Amino acid sequence: MRVSVGLPTGMEGLTYPIPFSEPKTVIRIAQHAEALGYHSVWGNDHMTTQQYVRAEFETPPRFWEPLITYAFVAAATETIRFGTGILVLPMRRDIVVTAKQIATLDHFSGGRLEVGLGIGAYREEFDALQPDSGLTRARIIDEGIPALKMLLSERVASFDGDFFKFRDVELYPKPKQNHLPIYIGGNNAANLRRTAKWADGWLPAAVHVDHLRVNVRQLRELAAAEGRDPNNIEVAPQYIVHIGKTREAALERFGETQMCAHLTSLRKSTLKDQGTLSHEDINLIGTVDDIVERAIALREAGVTHLCGLYFAANSEAELLDQMQVFAEEVVPRIR
């Protein structure tokens, strides 16, 4: 099972306090992940500040564009891979430019890019950027995924959708990797179907192991119906991590973090299917032994990649320390 780390490209004011995500901090996290042997780092994609964040913080958060950020990460590292977790296609009107950025970044990084795509956690962002589109985010991404794959693979591509349109585009060079990995983010049934049809991996957020087991079975059935080998599709959920000397200490500290407040806010959107389950019921919070036990259960449920783990911390030093403890004390016991 592969293990990777979340990069705070668009997390200040959400999962981390303000200020937190200095450019040098983002780079140091990626370098620390590489030194500790993590597979990859994964950053998210936000364009405008959410209303609840504006209400909580007087100073706006810094949301860094992930593809440009990765150009700097690539220059400051040598081997670690990086993925978009996720790139929000409905906020990106010009998909040809997005495809060109992806292909360019893959070449300049030596073929280290992985691409996660999704509709985004906050509808208000989409409404702010596309107020007159008249289309749902679901409709847009169902156009965007095949349009993007076409641009990245076909010599000359044309597409005539309701949102994305281009004609006779020869986008070259194609990505450096012969097969650029594409993941679909999101927890609902529609994203399972999108993954089975178009993607190399499924990237849900914080799914309880019992629910995940059911989802994996559904994904495998959908993939088989598409004529695909289900074993070739990664199951790569994202979880929150906080490690303590005791379970009580871990829970207490987690409750003090901005991460806890953020997860609570998502219960009305991305995480609404969690119902009455607590954050600690789902995520990797507790002692090293607690987390090893839960990670093994996830692996047995079908997880192949603990993807973009976000370490609950209110400072860079605390985050780097949590990453190190996980790498040194948890990872050797779950691979």
Image (spheres, rainbow, N blue to C red):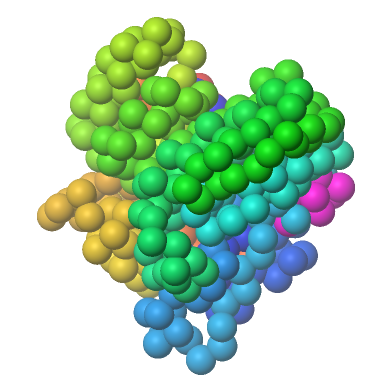
Asked where in the image residue 108 lies, by quadrant, the reply is top right
Up-down: is 85 above or below 258? above
Asked where in the image residue 291 lies, by quadrant, the reply is top left
Residue at 74% from the left image edge and 66% from the top image edge: 23
Residue at 81% from the left image edge and 53% from the top image edge: 72
Magenta stretch secondary structure, dominant: helix
Q: Nearer the viewer, residue 149 or 168?
A: 168
Residue at 63% from the left image edge and 29% from the top image edge: 150
Give x and y (percent) for residue 263: 34, 62
Q: Nearer the viewer, residue 222 or 253?
A: 222
Instruction: Give, as a single range, the part of the protein colored magenta.
Output: 69-76
Up-down: is 175 above or below 67? above
Give x and y (percent) for residue 181: 61, 27
Asked where in the image residue 284 lies, by quadrant, the reply is top left
Give x and y (percent) for residue 93: 59, 56
Residue at 52% from the left image edge and 69% from the top image edge: 129
Q: Nearer the viewer, residue 186 or 8?
A: 186
Q: In this image, 226 relative to 60: left or right? A: left
Q: Is 183 in the magenta?
A: no
